[in-house]
Image (cartoon, coloured by chain):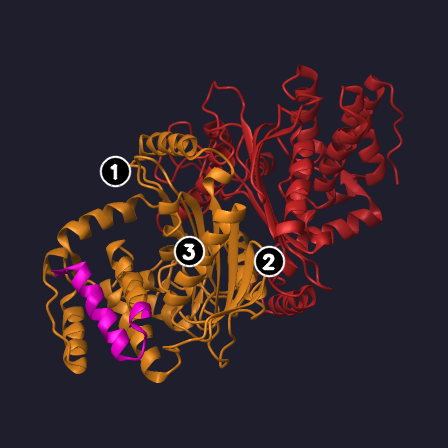
Chain colours: A red, B orange
Amino acid sequence: MADTTAAERVRVDPARLETLVATAYERLGMPADHARIAAHGVVLADLRGHESHGVSNNLFGFYLPGLRSGDINARPNIRILQESATTARWDADRGMGFVVGDIVMRDVMERAERYGCGFGAVANSRHYGMAQIYSLMALERNMIGMSMTNGVTPGVVPFQGREAKLGTNPITVTAPAGTEPPFVLDMATTTVAYGKIQNAQRDGRTVPPTWGLDRDGHTTTDPQAAMDGLRLLPLGATKEGSGHKGYGLGLWVDIFCGALSGSGFTAKAGEEENVNHFFGAWRVDAFVPVDEFKRLMDGRMRDLVSTPPLDGFDRVLYAGLPEWEAEQDRMAHGVALHPSVIVKLRGLADELGLAFDLLP
Amino acid sequence: MADTTAAERVRVDPARLETLVATAYERLGMPADHARIAAHGVVLADLRGHESHGVSNNLFGFYLPGLRSGDINARPNIRILQESATTARWDADRGMGFVVGDIVMRDVMERAERYGCGFGAVANSRHYGMAQIYSLMALERNMIGMSMTNGVTPGVVPFQGREAKLGTNPITVTAPAGTEPPFVLDMATTTVAYGKIQNAQRDGRTVPPTWGLDRDGHTTTDPQAAMDGLRLLPLGATKEGSGHKGYGLGLWVDIFCGALSGSGFTAKAGEEENVNHFFGAWRVDAFVPVDEFKRLMDGRMRDLVSTPPLDGFDRVLYAGLPEWEAEQDRMAHGVALHPSVIVKLRGLADELGLAFDLLP
């Protein structure tokens, strides 16, 4: 997005946007309740400032084409293959990842209510959007939430390696606070995601040589070469940056998602797409009284944001604070979309015979 | 260590080294079984190639002085303060972290046997050595292991911040394989630990400006200034390196260790030392048959090490493989110690009236 300034963008009402998307999903075969869950997830990404996972890119890039082609199963038979008191292994039957994630996250929270914690590994799923959608669900129940997913296709090299073998494999963990915004870590295990390289290309900037390799496995500062290379570097990137750590984190995600689900790992080039997830929840009061936990969290968050910033920075943040601020703004003033996205959404509404009325 | 070459080092027998350390701990007041556990942990760090956590530094830097001063309680009353089926919050009564870790890790594995997974948060502990000691214990029981600890004193800045607020806060996760060496991730959430800066100083090298800040919060390439600054940078380090991710990982560890234990966070300068841990285990066969999991793991590990390396690198590894190779070598040929460490160990034996016979 955004060869436009913020002022050129069009603010739309998030509830109406969600209804448009849900109705489109329903017309493409999804049950109404599933369509609503999946639409809520994609709009939540826009609300939280993760436009890369919102309607601008992923709706038209993944979800609508997947439903049309049948690669995403609109009416999956999502079921447990194996379970213990606190764990389950699921088959998602190629269902929309948002729906699978919602069902499994609710299951792990039920297990956590009964036993203190719960976990689910999911095979045979499809793109589940912004990873924090599911870990955020834990907060209102005073639980710690976790969500991970392995990648659709390999686009990340092992540290020191020339060929892509992993996905961007994000990890998210949430923890509730009291009066302060909650902790919400949501990070790809690469230095950056492809979106940042695309932005540099659009703006005519070079990229740091630590973001991605070219087709031949050489470092590059040319964003086009880095895009074509499909070889992102793990977080840390280099030997002196400790790139083995980002690689280790990515492989951790791949093991929890791919091996505990029994499904296998990020697909190789040419193989059928294979997406696997892992979800978890821990009840805070299975360890410590909730009030005491929240008092500690509030104190910690206030202490961190009060840290004097380094030269060149305005302030110190923590994971989840920028997203919380984005959500406050967008709930009040609407989601800001690029005019070209408005055109695409209008086209979608016209095609499906839906009303188009998104202005707040 | 090591202004010596490998050839100048002295190889000692790990079992005899462990016995010397255990006997020293016992003379300093620890029960025999606890002394053995704590000695095993420190020698395991040397076996696994983590000399920074072995007898060379930590034995003489933390454990012996702590037992002598009474800061480490040689006979702690380690007890559960609160629990659910799968979780517990512990008070370590200032006990040696190795002993606490062993007891709590066995408890979480027992809970995992019964319910699928188990977790423990520990307050009021002391330095527990190499983080992977505890997660490694899960492997022989065909479990996934997890261990985290927050720092003794703040030596890491929040991303964009000028003051140290966190410890190096390591995360370790292990997963068993079949015939291949297991996955063992064990990483500080900083770019590097202080040991690497000390090594550069010793060797007369500069350090990358992404490792640590000086006392004034400015980037530096002078290892002495970085040591004096006590302001390591989180993994990723800079804005373009995504330093907010390493910071987020460090804060995650601090929340699991500090808030779930009810203890609070990394101590502020001048406060009493406060170390907290978090341990976890998931039974593999609570998700998927063990044979199937190991088959997937072996295939994945073989696939990764077969990746063609980038220019300038010999081969592609994965987390745990270098440590496994170090352990094979050192179990066969002994632990290689610097001559100055031999002198210190001999002095310890003399002081305590112990036999000194470490040669293999």
Q: Is residue B29 magenta?
A: yes
The type of residue carrying mark 1 is Asp
Quarter-of-image position of residue B181: top left
Q: According to the image, label 1 marks what residue?
A: B314
Tell me the magenta residue range: B9-34
In the displayed structure, does residue A9 sit left or right of residue B46? right
Work out whether mark 1 precedes mark 2 in sequence or the reverse, and give the earlier one: 2
- Mark yes or no: residue B296 visible: yes
The rendered magenta stretch, by its main secondary structure, is classed as helix
Q: According to the image, label 2 marks what residue?
A: B84
Q: Nearer the viewer, residue B21 or A346?
A: B21
**How far apart are the two marked residues, 1 and 2, measured between alpha carbons?**
49 Å
Q: Is residue B70 magenta?
A: no
Please, what secondary structure does the residue beneath circle 2 have? Answer: loop
Quarter-of-image position of residue A286: bottom right
Q: Nearer the viewer, residue A73 or B116?
A: B116
